Amino acid sequence: MTRALIADDERLMREQLRTRLSEVWPELEIVAQAKNGQEAVALTEQHHPDIVFLDIRMPVLTGIDAARQIAQLPTYEDAQGWPGCEIVFITAYDQYAVEAFEQGVVDYVLKPAERERLQVTVARIRQRMAERSSHNAGDTDDLPPPLPTHTPDMQQLLQRLAGQINPQSPGKLQWIQATVRHSIQMIPVEDVLFFISDEKYTRVQTATVEALIRKPIKELIEELDMQLFWQIHRSTLVNVKAIAGVSRDERGRQLVSVRGLTEKLEVSRSYAGLFKAM
Amino acid sequence: MNHSLTPQTHPGTWSRFANTCVLAFHRYANWLVSISWWRFFGYSLLLLITVGIAHDLPPFSWTYTEVIEPKVEAPPKPPKPPKAPKAPGHEGVDISIDERGVRITTRPITPPAAPSVPAVPASAPVDAASTPSTKAASSGVTVTLPPNADASEVRKAIEEARREIETVIEEAKQDARDAAQEAADVRRPQFRTHRFIDLMPLTLWFILLSGIIKVTYKGKVQAEAKAAQATEVAESESLKRQVVEARMAAMQAQVEPHFLFNTLASIDHLIETDPPRASIMQKNLIALLRASMPTMREANAQGTRDLGRELAVIRPYLEILKVRMEERLQTEVHVSEGLLSAEFPPMMLQSLVENAIKHGLEPKAEGGRLTVSAEIVHGKLAVTVADTGLGFGKAATAGTGIGLSNIRERLALLYGGKASLNVTETPGGGTSVTITVPYVARAQTDQPE
């Protein structure tokens, strides 16, 4: 049984989408409805739906920001095996967003939801879900494609859209101000090989320096230029240029080796599909 | 100045050139009028001095030499040679003396009367005299004697006569030479040097002309200045109007696509689930659009509308939002009947209400209350839009403040300093915006302005 969550600040719109979905995809179960972005994130964590429908313009947290937070929710072992969810945006007008969605990174629904358009969206999602489940059933060497929310493409798109929907959001982080042996060091973002969360802190690793900052990975994802960094784990961001290669350990986990360092970084299951031979 | 020059060029260039000339003339004339007579005097003096100096510098010092030819129409006449020298060589005279007397006749020179006689006048005659016919060919005088004439006497006489004639001829020749000499003297060329450009007289004329312009142009300039000033005032007024209209157009466009499309989506849903409500909502949308549309036309005639009209615009807007936001939006409108006829500028109230919704109540999860009220304070009309939303500038969607600064500018344009816009934070955390304008009941302003 596929489970879904609908988030829209207007009840009428939630009802309308629910009605349409029941016509197009009768087996779909709507497990929760959210009235704003924040609720959507909380209810997603609580209910672990397979699909989340997010209105773009919502109070407290926009649909775009909610999607970014949902992408950072714990998955698999940390979330009773929940692999994360597909995200579908809902909009009445946001033209630039629609243009971006047309690129195919993510699905969307236009208000008022038309049956024909919704059918296309639903068909795409079902196909992707089917692909992933077949991979999961098969051998572990053939990795399933990651969820759209766990791809660098999606992270970049959401970062861009968030900037467009709220132009006042801060610019991209250029420097990391980190404490190194009682002094503050300015580390250019490009010099950082990776960020990895270390309980309360986030460890910043460059070729020569190792430093700690308080800013969590979740915030770094919003502030860093996500064209420079790939997320390979809920707690790890790695500089794309620093990735030397990916190997597997005896348990079948993928490990990223970083140029100039012996330390290897674990790739979590959600992101495993990122590294495949061409 | 070159305004007096009229070179021959082709028409296009010519008209342009003429325009430039006229312009230059007006500039110069204006300048002349603008300076005092003392200055004008100084200017003239300076001009003269400058020209005096320039006079000796190239190119003004360049000269050319004129050759004065004798006057063509009256060349000096050579003196008339005496009649006498004309005779020799031109025509002969025959003098015949016979029993009938002396006869003198003229004859043409050709053929020569005595070709056989050499032209040596003095030596020949002795031999010739022996012949009955004596000839003095060289002088063109032939004396024919009767054969029986006394030879010696005649010869003497002839000799005498011939001498006389020769003397006369000699004199005539001398006269002719003198005359020729005289003529030659008159024909010798004379030289006079000229400057290519002689500035002095030109400058004097120029100064004189400038003085005349200075006297006559003044009145014209004053009239023109007045006209220009009037035009300027008119232009600035129309500019103001344009600004207002442009702003208005910008605000008109703020019947936002988001609002419109979301409302249409809601209506679409209600048509299926609750047709009567769908109908009400659609009617509200129509009312809102209709109330928004003719604003431009009315704004052209007058800068203000009445408060009742403005409330008529926001009511359907709020009704629509209430359907969409449901329990998240409560609205109150406290405007007494008597104030509905008060003058109030268009689109401002709608702008404030939209701000309150967009930046105050919509971003707030639980929503809140929107209150619109109007009252007379110290003889002025104060219209307040208050909300219990997030508070001014708190929302992530907080605007750029363009909406409010637009309202401020428009108020300044419409009322000068007599209107104001105040933003305050209400104790509960919301925002309250008050527009204060002079209170004028609409009925009074219906009279022609």
Image (spheres, rainbow, N blue to C red):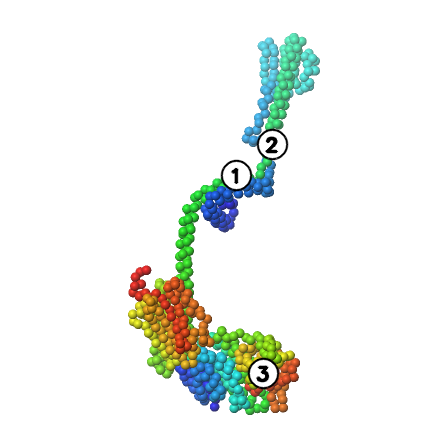
Instruction: Name the residue tied to disc 3.
Output: A196
Is residue A216 depicted above or below B31 in this figure?
A: below
SS for dot 2: strand
Identify the image quadrant of the C terminus of chain B: bottom left
State the image coordinates of residue A248 (x, y, percent, origin top left): 62, 87
Indicate the secondary structure of the residue bearing disc 3.
strand
Residue at screen point 65% across, 16% down: B136
| Residue under disc 3 on the same chain as residue under disc 1 | no
Residue B201's mark? 1
- State the residue in front, B19 or B357: B357
Measured in 3D between alpha carbons, the distance from the residue under mark 3 to the one under mark 1, in whole angstroms, is 96 Å
Decide which of B250, B443 is in the foreground and name it: B443
Q: Residue furthest front?
A: A182
Q: Amino acid at mark 3?
A: Ile
- Identify the residue position indicated by label 2 in the image: B190
Nearer mark to the viewer, of 2 and 1:
1
Q: Which residue occupies 49% across, 79% down?
A: A64
